[in-house]
Amino acid sequence: MLSRTADSLYWLGRYMERAGNTARALQVALREAGMGGGRPAQGQGWRALLLTSGDIGLLQGFGAAPDAVQIIQHLVMDRANPSSIQSCIEASRQNARQVRTALTVDMWEAVNDTWGQMRRMDDAMPSADDLPGFLDWVKRQTILFNGAYDDTMLRDEAWRFVRLGTMLERADNTARVLHAHAGALSIAEAGTAEDYLNWQAILRNFTALRAYQWVYHGRIEPRRIAELLILRGELPRSMIACHARIEAVLEEIATAHGGRRGECHRRAGEIHARLRFGRVEDIFAQGLETFLNEMMARNIDLGGQIAEFYLHN
């Protein structure tokens, strides 16, 4: 496979996943703020959202209380923001066009229909009443795309590079969300009612509230949240689940290339091994924020090594 084809498939997976992650995070922030999208935000939910998206610098222009309308505009429709939902969907469609013949009909329709509906919005922000429905729609479209490629693609190199992009983006998002809420998860005592709501919000970022209850059969505790989202492979959005798939896909690609491996394979295995043999007690002894800072740096480094070895030749 040509490196430019692999690059388009990889970024198709990443951008579709990023659009869905942004929609999920916005849904949680709106729920936390108890608003429909049109009032100034209060509390830490918006700060955590900007930390997750890497846009914390925006707070400098907002003063003490972030402006919810500006934040939502930036994350939904701002073409100057390469990670806004609109930018991600446009980038997904551009990459899909580059590799149209490598995609199944269902995959192409999932991407193209999403792009077409966004285009018909003509850069207009959804109203406060329509915003929750819009975010639900974005989330459904990304789930549709993931289901389309998982159910209809041959398990060949094209599938592997889409999968690789999806899993690396998902692993990075999980680390970023946990990092944004590291303070709330580092509380040693039982916590207040507000803390409990914050812990619920973290789980809702991953649609994992019911999964938590199924695994632990008890009240929500911050260390168990961290354990579930970092070290429990049963949860498909946990860090260990994502990195297990990244390592496996890289091994499959290497096998298809006659066993040729590079630094990206070593680093993917190293990250997975650390998570596989890690313990939540050790993570908190090190410091949750320190651990997550390190994991985010490792994710960025791994993405660079993958690009250097496979995508930029």
Image (spheres, rainbow, N blue to C red):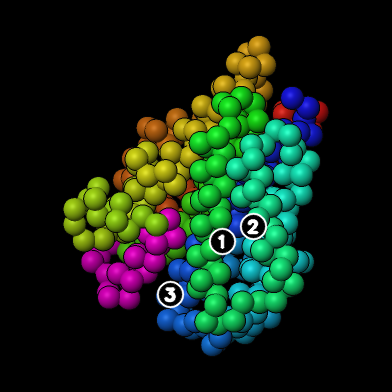
Q: Residue furthest left?
A: 217
Q: Nearer the viewer, mark 2 or mark 1?
A: 2
**Start and end of the magenta stretch?**
188-206
On the image, numbered disc 3 is attached to which residue? Answer: 31
Left or right of 187 in this view: 175: right
State which quadrant residue 258 falls in: top right
Amino acid of disc 3: Arg
Task: Give the residue displayed 58% in from the left and 50% down from the top.
Answer: 17
Q: Is residue 122 magenta?
A: no
> Dot 2, how many residues are within 10 Å of its Cα: few (below 14), some (14-19), or many (20+)?
many
Secondary structure found at label 3: helix
Task: Give the residue displayed 42% in from the left and 81% down from the top.
Answer: 34
- Position of residue 260 relative to residue 284, above or below, is above
Task: Give the residue displayed 42% in from the left and 43% down from the top.
Answer: 236
Q: Are marks 3 and 2 in contact (CB under 8 Å)?
A: no
On the image, numbered disc 2 is attached to which residue? Answer: 114
Q: Nearer the viewer, mark 3 or mark 1?
A: 1
Which quadrant, please, contains the C terminus? top right
Q: Are marks 2 and 1 in contact (CB under 8 Å)?
A: yes
> Reading the chain from its start, which is encountered first: label 3 or label 1?
3
Nearest the eye: 190 or 196: 196
Task: Give the residue displayed 59% in from the left and 81% down from the top.
Answer: 127
Residue 180 visible in rendering: no
